[in-house]
Image (spheres, rainbow, N blue to C red):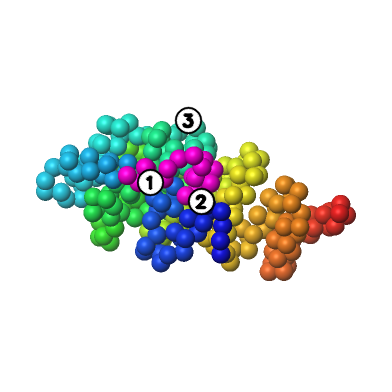
């Protein structure tokens, strides 16, 4: 399979074995499709320098909480990184280069900055795709602590995560164990793309939304609902032959889906307007 650059770079990166996918590279390739005029290698080098700066400031012995404290001081106090609460749905918050440049982002992209610095310090951390929020934690299983990169690196225990979950949903929530399971790189990237897709769909920027959904389909080629969504975007863009292909495929796979009647109406409408 061959695509135009940088989608080809994204495809090659996510085609590797799961444990070899470089999240920073993949995230920068996502950004380059929407903002092509930057050199992704410069950002990788910048992350290298950031990690080196933290290592210079790190007190010894370097145990986990001391490393987290050093990263927090560097990112939030020295560099002024912050979660973007005032313009949360700005697509720039999902572009990794912009997050590094502007020093602000949403939970998952702020977490990626943190993860990449920690990785370069030989302190591997993993993403935690908690519903409604995104956290990270040290990779070793018995760490028992979580870090909120969006919230200035606050260290949380499971009880704090349950409280955070209840705050997000505005009602008491029970923290189920699977809510704190680590997510794999492809899941991480899919969640990033899902955020970006929602942003573009909500403002009707269908050309940009299409770029996002096409990459979700590359990540999850068997997800028929994403192909349906791609077909709906094709429909909005009057690319009806492509829309028909995706929407008919959706109905063939899920003929009793709740929205099957609506999808069939769209197919009928395209037939009438040929």
Q: Residue 252: where, in percent of width, then height? A: 72, 69
Disc 2 element: loop
Residue 161 relative to residue 8: left or right = left
Instruction: Locate residue 77: give its quadrant.
Output: top left
Disc 3 element: loop
Q: How many marks?
A: 3
Mark 1 packing: few (<14 Cα in 10 Å), some, or many (20+)? few
Q: Which residue has dot 2 on it?
A: 6
Question: Which numbered dot is residue 120?
Answer: none
Disc 1 + disc 3, Cβ < 8 Å: no
Q: Residue 143: where, in percent of width, then height? A: 25, 56
Disc 1 + disc 2, Cβ < 8 Å: no
Q: Residue furthest right?
A: 272
Please report the bounds of the magenta region as a residue range. Answer: 29-45
Above or below for 248 versus 103 = below
Disc 1 element: helix
Instruction: Locate residue 18: give its quadrant.
Output: bottom left
Residue 128 seen in the current view: no
Above or below for 215 versus 109 = below
Mark 2 packing: few (<14 Cα in 10 Å), some, or many (20+)? some
Q: Earlier in the sequence, mark 2 or mark 3?
A: 2
Label 1, label 3: how far apart the Cα atoms are? 30 Å
The residue closer to the viewer here, 264 or 8, is: 8
Above or below for 60 versus 216 = above
Residue at 61 percent of width and 58 percent of height: 226
Question: Which numbered dot is residue 86?
Answer: 3
Residue at 64 percent of width and 45 percent of height: 207
Q: Earlier in the sequence, mark 1 or mark 2?
A: 2
Question: Which numbered dot is residue 41?
Answer: 1
């Amino acid at each position: 399979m061959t695509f135009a650059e940088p989608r080809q770079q994204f495809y090659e990166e996510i085609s590797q074995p799961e444990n070899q996918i470089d999240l920073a590279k993949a995230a920068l390739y996502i950004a380059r499709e929407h903002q092509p005029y930057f050199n992704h290698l410069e950002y990788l080098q910048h992350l290298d320098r950031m990690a080196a700066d933290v290592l210079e400031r790190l007190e010894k012995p370097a145990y986990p909480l001391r490393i987290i404290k050093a990263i927090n001081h560097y990112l939030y106090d020295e560099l002024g990184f912050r979660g973007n609460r005032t313009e949360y749905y700005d697509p720039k918050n999902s572009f990794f280069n912009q997050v590094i440049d502007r020093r602000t982002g949403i939970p998952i992209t702020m977490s990626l900055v943190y993860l990449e610095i920690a990785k370069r310090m030989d302190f591997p951390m993993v993403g935690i795709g908690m519903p409604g929020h995104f956290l990270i934690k040290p990779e070793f299983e018995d760490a028992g602590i979580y870090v909120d990169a969006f919230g200035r690196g606050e260290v949380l225990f499971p009880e704090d995560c349950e409280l955070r979950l209840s705050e997000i949903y505005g009602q008491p929530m029970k923290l189920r164990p699977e809510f704190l399971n680590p997510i794999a790189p492809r899941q991480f990237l899919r969640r990033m793309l899902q955020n970006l897709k929602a942003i573009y769909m909500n403002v009707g920027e269908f050309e940009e939304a299409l770029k996002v959904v096409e990459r979700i389909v590359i990540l999850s080629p068997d997800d028929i609902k994403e192909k349906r969504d791609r077909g709906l975007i094709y429909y909005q863009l009057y690319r009806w032959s492509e829309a028909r292909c995706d929407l008919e495929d959706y109905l063939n796979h899920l003929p009793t889906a709740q929205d099957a009647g609506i999808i069939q109406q769209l197919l009928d409408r395209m037939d009438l307007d040929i």
